[in-house]
């Protein structure tokens, strides 16, 4: 069962959250959203099927208070958002002189209340370990009481000193499947954050159906998730459309690999009725 608190029905006590990266995709109307669903209703419909989502749009701009409050109103109790820090902080200012953007972003996200999940700090390939002092200063200046996850995309970061920094700050190392990075299973705090990204060149800009069979990869991820759950860790998993071609189907397939029964919404549209791969 994955509604509300979403706990394993078996011996595992950790909470598991499965969702997608974003929800505003017109290609999902029909295979995931009911035919005729307007963009303004996407999040409402999404929240009937999944209990968490990574907010990709906050990477590009800081939303207004009205927008954030609307997200909170559109979702039921127990729903969780995982917002990305704006690229103005991580990519443009490289963590320097960004206090105004940081504080504004965090204050806006606080309007989600108890629906605010981990906040994700994503870096690109050019952010190297030589800049670790900037990351340490930024992480240590973040307010306590919230969960943070850090994604790096250069192998130079994969060292004990970096893991120790995350452990000190109680931040999660983002685990992902980038083709040029090793697939890790390292937990640095009491929760795990997984992003199923895929490869952009393999999936064109049509996210209406599954294009790639990822059964083997999902089985491997399911094994890791079981191990984390056995260790009592909370797990967040978010799928990008580029992973298989249709992110809601990835959520469905991962749940099947894990043996989780997802509750379908009432009405004619069954849960994750995505067309098969073409």
Image: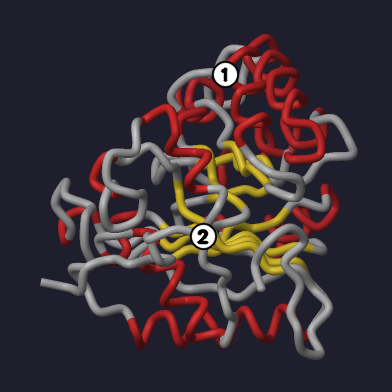
Query: Vertically, is 143 above or below 119?
Result: above
- Judging depth in this view, the residue of 259 and 191 nearest the camera is 259
Q: In the rendering, which numbered label is found on residue 76?
A: none
Query: Vertically, is 38 above or below 246?
Result: above
Disc 1 target residue: 67
Quarter of the picture holding the N terminus: bottom right
In front: label 1 or label 2: 2
Residue under the image location 82 percent in, 64 percent down: 190
Count of numbered circles in the view: 2
Residue 180: percent from left, percent from top: 33, 64
- Judging depth in this view, the residue of 97 and 16 nearest the camera is 16
Residue under the image location 21 percent in, 68 percent down: 275
Residue under the image location 44 percent in, 72 percent down: 252
Query: Vertically, is 260 above or below 91?
Result: below
Q: Is residue 244 left or right of residue 87?
A: left
Q: Is residue 51 left or right of residue 212?
A: right
> Which element is circle 1 on?
helix
Q: Is residue 40 left or right of residue 171?
A: left
Disc 2 target residue: 266
Quarter of the picture holding the C terminus: bottom left
Residue under the image location 73 percent in, 39 percent down: 116
Residue 176: percent from left, percent from top: 48, 63
List the single residue furthest toward the front: 267
């Amino acid at each position: 069962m994955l509604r509300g608190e979403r706990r394993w029905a078996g011996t595992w006590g950790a909470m598991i959250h499965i969702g997608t990266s974003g929800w505003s995709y017109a290609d999902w109307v029909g295979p995931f959203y009911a035919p005729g669903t307007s963009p303004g209703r996407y999040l409402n419909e999404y929240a009937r099927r999944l209990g968490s989502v990574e907010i990709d749009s906050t990477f590009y701009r800081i939303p207004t208070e009205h927008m954030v409050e609307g997200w909170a109103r559109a979702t039921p109790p127990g729903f969780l958002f995982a917002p990305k820090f704006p690229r103005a902080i991580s990519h443009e200012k490289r963590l320097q002189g960004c206090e105004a953007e940081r504080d504004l972003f965090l204050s806006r996200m606080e309007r989600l209340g108890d629906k605010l999940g981990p906040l994700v700090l994503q870096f690109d390939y050019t952010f190297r370990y030589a800049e670790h002092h900037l990351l340490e200063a930024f992480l240590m200046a973040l307010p306590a009481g919230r969960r943070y996850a850090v994604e790096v995309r250069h192998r130079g970061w994969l060292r004990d000193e970096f893991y120790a920094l995350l452990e000190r700050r109680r931040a999660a190392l983002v685990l992902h499947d980038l083709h040029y990075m090793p697939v890790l299973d390292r937990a640095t705090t009491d929760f795990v954050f997984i992003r199923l990204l895929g490869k952009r060149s393999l999936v064109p800009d049509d996210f209406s159906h599954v294009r790639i069979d990822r059964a083997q990869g999902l089985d491997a991820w399911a094994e890791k998730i079981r191990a984390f759950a056995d260790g009592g860790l909370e797990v967040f998993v978010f799928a990008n459309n580029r992973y298989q071609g249709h992110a809601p189907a990835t959520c469905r397939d991962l749940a099947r690999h894990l043996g989780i029964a997802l509750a379908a919404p009432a009405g004619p549209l069954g849960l994750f009725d995505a067309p098969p791969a073409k």
